Image: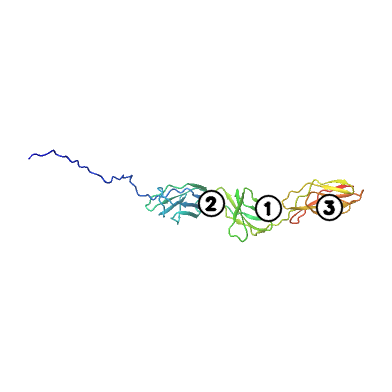
């Protein structure tokens, strides 16, 4: 039997799916990122330390908790009882650290026992506790309220203020001297002042005045200056320099005839001038001017001027 040509059938293997295999993914180390906001200060006989436990790991995974927090101040290990992300506030006595330059830093230990990098470091020169400020007084002053105190050993001060019914005080200023003028007060309101001393990285306890003080305007405007008198027909024209106080109300004008006593002849003048009319020609007159404020405080009278119309 004769065979025909052999047909060679090519067998093709079709691959229905050829997916790309990417780089292998390794499990997260669950290592929190380095703490970078550590703050530490000596407050009286205590070290006060603040920092934040981060919420993510070095590879971007959310942190639920850590095994422990390793906080050290020099050779002293300070216990931390929080192990979840968020702010941490720690206070520890300075016992055993006085006279040393103490380095404070912190790191986190994850559940597998691996440690994060150490945080930013804060170096403190731990000194004997500063005594709190003493002899704290608040007095009325033309510029506001003047607060004074004494505190040996402190080189800088923080000043705080609150209303008597408030629970917390707000810092209103700082000073390198043992006095401070609060220029933000309002007459008729009551304030309670506190002061804290600082020397380098050491803070004293905050001292508060024994009594609140109520501000009162007892300060008259400045004495008017530049008073002049010009003669007219049976009259005298007075003029003087204008006062610039914010609570200024008006001027009072006084006159003396033939060296007699001064008598008020005008009050609550808004402008620095006055025309005294219906005078007797040839009679000798003296004039003086004072200034008054909204609270009724009147200045001393100006230097007198003399004239004979």
Which residue is at the front of the view, 288 or 90? 288
Q: Earlier in the sequence, mark 1 or mark 2?
A: 2
Which residue is at the front of the view, 102 or 287? 287
Q: Earlier in the sequence, mark 3 or mark 1?
A: 1
Residue 208 image position (x, y, % from top left): 61, 57
One can see residue 153 in this view:
no
Does dot 3 land on a helix, a strand or a loop?
strand
Residue 28 image position (x, y, % from top left): 37, 49
Residue 137 image position (x, y, % from top left): 66, 55
Residue 79 image position (x, y, % from top left): 45, 55
Is label 3 or label 1 in front?
Answer: 3
Number of the label disc, if any, that sits on residue 144: 1
Relative placement, left or right, of 150 versus 112 is right
Mark 1–mark 2 CB contact (< 8 Å): no
Q: How is the image coloured?
A: rainbow
Is label 1 or label 2 in front?
Answer: 1
The answer to which image quadrant residue 67 occupies is: bottom left
Q: Can you identify the residue that label 2 sits on? A: 42
């Amino acid at each position: 039997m004769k065979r025909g040509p052999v047909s060679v059938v090519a067998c093709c293997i079709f691959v229905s799916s050829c997916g790309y295999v990417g780089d292998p993914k390794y499990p997260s180390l669950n290592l929190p990122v380095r703490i970078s906001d550590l703050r530490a200060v000596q407050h009286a006989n205590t070290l006060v330390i603040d920092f934040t436990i981060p919420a993510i790991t070095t590879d971007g995974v959310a942190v639920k908790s850590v095994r422990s927090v390793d906080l050290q101040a020099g050779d002293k290990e300070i216990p931390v009882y929080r192990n979840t992300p968020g702010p941490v506030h720690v206070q520890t006595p300075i016992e055993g650290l006085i006279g040393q330059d103490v380095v404070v830093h912190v790191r986190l230990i994850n559940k597998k026992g691996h440690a994060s990098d150490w945080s930013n470091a804060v170096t403190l020169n731990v000194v004997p506790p500063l005594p709190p400020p003493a002899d704290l007084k608040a007095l009325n002053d033309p510029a506001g309220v003047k607060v004074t105190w004494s505190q040996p050993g402190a080189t800088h001060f923080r000043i705080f203020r609150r209303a008597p019914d408030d629970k917390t005080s707000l810092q209103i200023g700082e000073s390198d001297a043992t006095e401070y003028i609060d220029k933000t007060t309002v007459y008729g309101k009551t304030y309670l002042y506190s002061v804290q001393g600082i020397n380098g990285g050491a803070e004293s306890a905050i001292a508060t005045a024994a009594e609140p003080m109520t501000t009162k305007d007892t300060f008259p405007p400045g004495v008017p200056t530049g008073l002049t008198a010009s003669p007219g027909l049976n009259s005298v024209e007075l003029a003087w320099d204008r006062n610039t106080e914010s609570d200024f109300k008006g001027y009072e004008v006084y006159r003396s005839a033939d060296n007699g006593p001064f008598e008020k002849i005008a009050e609550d003048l808004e402008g620095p001038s006055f025309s005294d009319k219906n005078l007797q020609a040839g009679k000798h007159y003296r004039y003086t001017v004072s200034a008054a404020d909204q609270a009724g405080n009147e200045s001393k009278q100006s230097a007198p001027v003399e004239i004979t119309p």
